[in-house]
Image: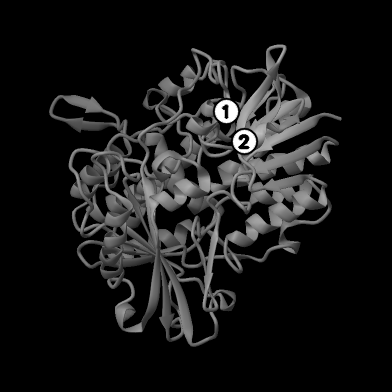
Amino acid sequence: MARIAVIGAGMGAMATAARLAVAGHRVAVYERTETYGGAVRRLERDGFAFDTGPGLLTLPAVYRDLFVKTGKEPLESVVELVQVDPSTRHVFADGTEVSLPNASRAGVVSALDEALGSDAGARWGDFLVRAREAWDRTRRPLLEEPLWPNWSVLADREPYPSVPHKKLLRTRRAGTLAEVGAWELRDPRLVALLESHALAYGLDPRVAPASAAVLPYMEHAFGTWYVRGGIRELARAVYERCVARRVEFHFGVEVTGVLEKDGRAAGLELADAVAAEADFVVAGVAPDVLSRCVRGTAVREADAVPPQRGLPSRLTVLLALRGGRPEGAAHRTVVHAQDRERELDLLFGASSGLDAHPTLTVLRPDDPGVVPGPDHEAIALTATVPADADQAGPTSEVFDDHADTLITAAERAVPDLRERLLWHEVRVPADIAEATGAEGGAVPAPALAAAEGRLLHPANTTGLPGLFTVGGWSHPGGGLPHAGMSGALVAGLIVEGPEFRGSR
């Protein structure tokens, strides 16, 4: 039985802790803040409850597997999963609207044909077939296996089977998601639909590889799910599973260093010079936080995938409304930007400022557990924004002011929003930074193949034997399902050793 010290109580860290505890190890988690869940938080006020992190779940099988592998109690016995249908309502810049059914290719094709014109559905359906091929090629190496030592193979290989595009005398294949949209989908509304999936993860579709096609495919193939009471209920369930398996949690404890002995990790140095000895250390924190804790030793080897930098953040506006949720309202609506190129320039560095008409996600859960009564509604607005305050970037005060812009944009989806508004609260990138420790409140993106490895994440092993990394800033990257998968990978590497190659 080994002693395991875990830095942070995010979703990936807790998934690791639960699996290691079931394997017979003594696990202690040290969390800087006063609660668990990392970015998966909740705000409660006046009988309203809001998720301040992710609001929906894809690939619920990841957490079903976690609960099966850590006890006899299935996930559905501790949380209520609801499949969201329609999956998404889209409001495009020209005023066109379409509601896409959940996990139904035929239904999606029919809806797109009716809303956007004949052949639109067929083009999107054909794209999904190609996206599935990219998924099949990358699922194991990018989600289910530890990062390959020869990871450069993934960096060079584009798994998306692009359609040849002829222009003048040249034949080209799409290398970026934007080129997939322009050459294979062609309709600007279909392009906006495609690119909104990348933007939701903080990716610029103009440079994101064509393999980012797996992002819309995951939602299409495995559905979009809501946890009754909010996604925070999933974090609670994972935390309680850890406690039931005798994982120790220490909240409000700052980790100041990783102890080393005989060239390997040997525990943690806590505030006030208190030491917590361990045989293995698992770090579920952002790269800069970990680098400060590991002094004098390179966390990553010279040929390792470098940590991602310069990622954007999210701005969230939480709205308490009088009046009940209208029957038939979509759970999720994406309101598309009026000028997508301008929005991308502002987000990814070609210009400065915040877009007055951004791409916006509106979440309207049909859940009596998040409102004080049937005559109220709770809505969350989310937009991708630059990370908080460097010298030239936006500040928290600017983001607060931008919240009114999001409310105005949301009126395209909820026309009577301002008349019904009781109050609102804003969660800016600085709040994400406080919860997760990520510089500027940056949010990690999922791992993707190709693009010279820019969207891969460092391996879960490190340059210091006995130290492992978990969560969105290491393989396989950001997102709730990816966090759960990273927990399974790290637990496997500790229990089975370097020969572990993933679950079969």
Q: Specify the label residue 498 is tagged with.
A: none
**What is the total number of numbered labels drawn onto the structure image?**
2
On screen, residue 376 versus residue 261, left or right, reads left
Whether residues under marks 1 and 2 lie with C-beta atoms below 8 angstroms apart, the answer is yes
**Residue 36 locus on image (x, y percent):** 63, 52
The foreground one among 402 and 125 is 402
Give the SS element for disc 2: strand
* Outermost residue, front side: 272
The amino acid at mark 2 is Val
The foreground one among 163 and 244 is 244
**Residue 207 locus on image (x, y percent):** 30, 34
The foreground one among 119 and 323 is 323
Residue with the mark numbered 1 = 293
On screen, residue 437 versus residue 343, left or right, reads right
* Quadrant housing the N terminus: top right
The amino acid at mark 1 is Cys
Q: Residues within 10 Å of mark 1 (few under 14, many from 20)?
A: some
Residue with the mark numbered 2 = 255
Inspect this view and state whether residue 65 appears.
no
Give the SS element for disc 1: helix
Inspect this view and state whether residue 150 appears.
yes
Note whether 321 is above or below 338 in the view shown.
below
Which quadrant of the view contains residue 234? bottom right
* Quadrant housing the C terminus: top right
Q: Distance between the residues labelled 1 and 2?
A: 7 Å
Between discs 1 and 2, the one toward the N terminus: 2
Residue depicted at x 84% and y 53%? 72
Note whether 391 is above or below 44 in the view shown.
above
Which quadrant of the view contains residue 198? top left
Residue depicted at x 46% and y 64%? 101
Residue depicted at x 23% and y 38%? 349
**Residue 19 locus on image (x, y percent):** 76, 40
